[in-house]
Amino acid sequence: MNNTDKIYNLAVSGVQKLIPYTPGKPIEELERELGLSNIIKLASNENPLGPGKKALAAIQATLKDLALYPDGNGFNLKSALAEKYAVDMSQITLGNGSNEILELVARAFLTPGLEVVFSQHAFAVYPIVTQAVGATAVVAPALNYGHDLDAMLQRVTDKTRLVFIANPNNPTGTLLNHADLEAFIGALPDTCVCVLDEAYCEFVGGQSEDNSIAWLKKYPNLLITRTFSKAYGLAGLRIGYGLSSPQLADILNRVRQPFNNNMLALAAAEAALTDVEHLQNTITVNAQGMQFITEGFKNLGLGWIPSAGNFVLVDLKQPAMPTYEALLRKGVIVRPVGVYELPNHLRITIGTQAENQLFLQALTEVLGRIGSLPIATLPPSLAVAG
Ligand SMILES: *Cc1c(COP(=O)(O)O)cnc(C)c1O
């Protein structure tokens, strides 16, 4: 270690051992590396339809105010969310993406010596926020690629201060049954905060979006996190939120930066909540794309993990990196998931019909197999080019 490297010894011990999050490869980066154009990115579970018109109009109308600080309490967005979910505004915490909420809860509740339980193959941010504050991660083995709630509960001790659950889970797309999930939350000791990460809840359908909200009345230690990054198509603005008891929200607000949400994000998110049509289109395109892509996998003789989100893990039954790299050379960015202990899988975000077709063609060529591609099933109005 040379002199300049000595600074690493000064970082707190959790940070010294921290391996940063690896995001999906940006389109511009691949453009620079390979000199390709027409790249498609199906790597970060972004909305392939882009932001909605109402969100864009709200951003436009807000630009003139950019010299001012944003509303640090996010009054308008919180009011809209409170109305949508029939909760009190005091139950809402706004975050710079829901990732920030995950970080706030770790900072507010964890110290070295305390433990955090989450599942194998669960979202990569959980180990990162745990380690950054020097707490101990306790990883429960997965069951059929999803959360094994019994195995998780068995690992909860009086030292466990946090439990993270992603439902649907990223990257596996697995979904827990609501009765099982509630039983799990109810069985946790009241010394343990349960974070229910619902970044993809809009894609699930049914009563799913409302079920967990009803639990807030019963469990003051429950924190639900949601985001505008996925179904609402605003990943670039960084805005998400937590729903909890007012007391838990008060604690999170103490460690939150005063202006953590920028003005454009606040305005766009509020408008996005009213854009029911864009959300519905998004959900429809996703459902049809999911069917199209998984049919493509079937034709190629590939397995996949059934997903409740806007992405799917395909099982290549061999190390996935060569296929990932070969797809990159064809201008298709997907996501390797080796860091999730899934070295033979790739995660594919469902795109537009055109993107899904390009992806399947590229995959077919890369795997050197002849598969008959399913015929497009989308109505022309929804077949938006990427
Ligand atoms: C994408 C994602 C998030 C958060 O994304 P933000 O853009 O920070 O809101 C949180 N949890 C899971 C499981 C995700 O996949």
Image (cartoon, rainbow, N blue to C red):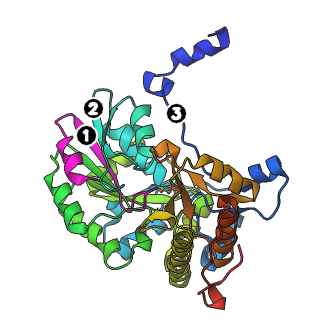
| Along the line of sight, the residue nearer the viewer: 237 or 145 | 145
Secondary structure category for the residue under label 3: loop
Residue at 71 percent of width and 77 percent of height = 385
The residue carrying pointer 1 sits among few (fewer than 14), some (14 to 19) or many (20 or more) residues within 10 Å by Cα, namely many
Q: In the image, is 120 to the left or to the right of 299?
A: left
Numbered circle sitting on residue 161: 1
Against 3, is 170 above or below? below
Quadrant, the C terminus: bottom right
Instruction: Answer with mark 3 or mark 1, whichever residue precedes in sequence.
Output: 3
Q: Considering only vertical position in the picture, is 159 above or below 368?
A: above
Please tell me the numbered disc located at residue 114: 2
What is the three-letter code of the residue carrying label 3? Ile
Indicate the amino acid at tag 1.
Arg
Among the two numbered marks 3 and 2 on one chain, the one whose residue lies closer to the N terminus: 3
Q: Which mark is residue 19?
A: 3
Callout 1: CB less than 8 Å from ligand 1: no
Q: Are marks 1 and 2 in contact (CB under 8 Å)?
A: yes
Q: Which residues are magenta?
A: 148-173
x, y (%) of residue 171?
A: 46, 55
> Rounded to the nearest whole Å, what is the CA distance between mark 3 and mark 2?
20 Å
x%, y% of residue 124? 46, 45
Question: In this picture, is 346 found above or below 295?
Answer: above
Whether residue 256 can be seen here = no
Secondary structure type for disc 2: loop
Queried whether the magenta region covers residue 165, the answer comes back as yes
Q: Nearer the viewer, mark 3 or mark 2?
A: 3
How many tags in the picture? 3
Q: What's under tag 2, amino acid-wise?
A: Leu
